[in-house]
Image (spheres, rainbow, N blue to C red):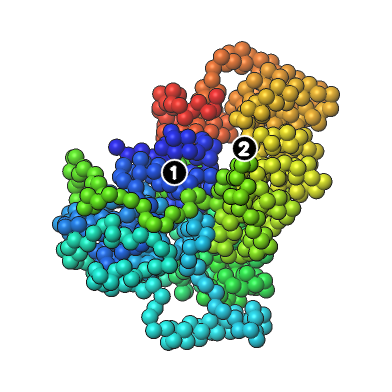
Amino acid sequence: MTARLEDVLLARGLLSPERVVEALRDHALGGGQLDTVILELGGLSERELLSALADAAGVQALHLGDYEPNVAVAAELPADIAERLDVVPLSTEGQTLHVASAYPVPELELHALAEMRHRKIVPWVAISARVRDWLLVLYGLPLPAREAAVLAALEPHRPLPLPLPAPEADSADSLDEGLTLEELLAKDMLAREASSRAETTPVRPAPPVPAPEKAAHQGPASRGRAKTEQAFPMLGTAAFPLAPPGPAAPSPGEAAVQWTLEEARSALRAVTSEREGIKDVALRYGRQTFDYLAAFAVVHGQAVGWDARGEGADKARLQQLSVPLDVPSLFRTVALAHAAYAGPVPKDAKTRDVLLQLRRAPRTVFLHPVEVKGRLVALVYGDRAGKPVSQRRLAEFRLFCQELSGAFAELLVLRRQLGRAAGAAEVPPPVALPETPPARQGPPGGLDWAPGVRAAADSLGRATTRPGPGQPEGARPPPDFQPLLAGLLGSEPVQRARAMAELARTPEPSARVLAEAFPGPTAWSRLPVEELPVADELGPIPAALVRLGRPGASALAPLLDAPSADTRYFALLTAGNLPFPELVPGVLRGVFDLVPELSSAARMAARALRRLPRFEAAMPSLRQELAARDPMRRILAARALGALRDRLSVEGLIGLTGSDDVLCATAAAEALFEITRASFGLTKRAWVAWWAENRRRSRSQWLLAALRHKDVAVRRPAAEELTSALGETLGYSADGPEKTRELAVQRWELALQDPRLRALN
């Protein structure tokens, strides 16, 4: 019996409930594989995650980093099937083919394939980034930018092909500043043609099936890994003949649909529960206006290529592209402005580089940000090279793009299960499965399963253990920080990941250097926040500090009281990603900052640190501030207690609703709504009556009662909280018909004893 990955991580104590919710949210909005999202968040070693994947999938785990890809068995699985299923062949043993699969393991499809080929296929689960790495070696399939960055952080010193390497510039025309985009594209094409003529053998081609004795000489031998064929003996590779491997040919561009604006909005409303559907509708409708459309998912401060339509669209090429939003470019401008851009191509180097890599030389470009609760989650790009853009169609497409924020927001509420990728349709298997699944196989050939000679890095940019006082000779000397900072602040995500991993090797000196450069470049605007952003969204320096753990928290603590409001703002948001007691006093002081954006940031950080014993010990003092002489302190204390959902402050807040100061009374009423999800405004008598009836009930029961409220503005936030805690909607929709809602509420009543809902109390 399989389990959900998030449940396994929670049961093992590897991730906190807050981190699980954060990972599931990022997975829903940014897509990708769930294990990749978790590794990007940091704080969990690769082997810990791999063990959890095995429990969740119900199959044995395989650390692909300990073995070389065996190109001798590449022909056992066609490239298009391997790419579609995210599996790679490992070895053959008689009539059995062993494969490594990303999570979730596509057991139905593999079983159907085995039935069709009259073979037995035994799956092993592996980290998805490792599977993509093997797909590159075995079939020449491109390595997406996110997986490349994860691998670079896991193994900083490993030779790794960079995604979309930029063409080398001649010394005489460094950076090609005087060339137009058309000239740059022509120069790049000539350079590539010359390079292909000069090459005698292509780099990592789709390999033929070599003889077994030659297999040891294939693949990147510089990694020094143990060969897979030593663990998976070659036995009868010819028994499973399939088509020769090779990347699938790109599909032709899809014709534009002829929708009116209202028809496009209707099409969008029909797919709000599907991430891929939202993207597809946007790109198809945009083809009426632009020659080329592309969607970028925003993941941890990077605009990652997602999909493209139109002239010369190449999805595989786009997915190799990742643009840091803190580097000066059109992408950063749009992110900071929270507004769309339509006009000529900007002159900055990064935008030109992106267009060069996409093989685009447009006259007009368009970029629209898609935000959910103040957080950038996607970008829609369009361009046109020939005819001018129709202003009417452009205006209609901009109006349509404004609907995308609501669609993504609905996506988070409507999905029945946050732990699965939105829009992934469950396709029935072409053959029936047996009632009893086949028994899991041990290591092929009965060999003792031992790791290879090399040890892969065991974490994604986590700080290493500091040598003890009695081991000064073993302490790692501080590195040269200038090259590391240059890589960290550069525009290449792979180099950034490597720099973060190197900084984590010497946490204390690295933390001091990073604190001196804090906050560094960023694409995050100083605005009030409704949700705590992950550190990567704040910029590379906050992200690196968070990966250092406690040394990063110690270096960050003084910055919470820095003279600069900007520094304090980013320090507060970063502190929310570092649950260490050193930061509690500074965050509590920030709660009373008179600058609205800063007190807002402090409240979100306080919510993240709420479970720390030091924070719990400070809560009585915070509640006492409701009776402070200064009315502004009362207001800020009420807002903080509401953000913390502190039920012990309910009586004090009810008393404050009767204050003669309207602002104080309003702040108290808003805080009570956040805590109780009851809505009585400034009517103190109604609050007193409600409290007398409900004080002995749990907060989850208060939320359940709110699901029956007549006002949808009360029902919706209560449903969002319950859904986030349980990971299921149980069929409840705040906008649904009353009878349907009532049936769902009854299901929620049966689920009240679920331990996942205890965090709400």
Residue 508 appearing in the image: yes
Report, in whole angstroms, how far the alpha carbon at label 2 lies from the one at label 1.
20 Å
Q: What residue is rendered at 70% in x and 45% in y? A: 555
Q: What residue is rendered at 51% in x and 84% in y? A: 191
Direction from residue 658 to residue 92 in the image, left or right? left
Locate residue 726, reporting x and y percent. Answer: 46, 33
Which residue is identified by label 1?
Answer: 48
Residue 469 numbered mark, or none: none
Q: Nearer the viewer, residue 46 or 23?
A: 46
Locate residue 552, reporting x and y percent. Answer: 66, 45
Q: Amino acid at mark 2?
A: Pro
Mark 2, secondary structure of its residue: loop
Residue neighbourhood size for the residue with mark 1, other residues' Cα within 10 Å, grouped as few (<14), some (14–19), many (≥20): some
Direction from residue 491 to residue 410 in the image, left or right? left
Quadrant in the picture for the N terminus:
top left
Q: Is residue 290 above or below residue 92?
A: below
Q: Nearer the viewer, residue 186 or 92?
A: 92
Q: What residue is rendered at 54% in x and 37% in y? A: 18
Mark 1, secondary structure of its residue: helix
Q: Quadrant of residue 620?
A: top right
- Which comes before the other along the chain, label 2 or label 1? 1
Residue 326 appearing in the image: no
Residue 579 numbered mark, or none: 2
Q: Amino acid at mark 1?
A: Glu
Locate residue 134, reporting x and y percent. Answer: 37, 62
In the picture as drawn, the residue positioned furthest to the right comes out as 629
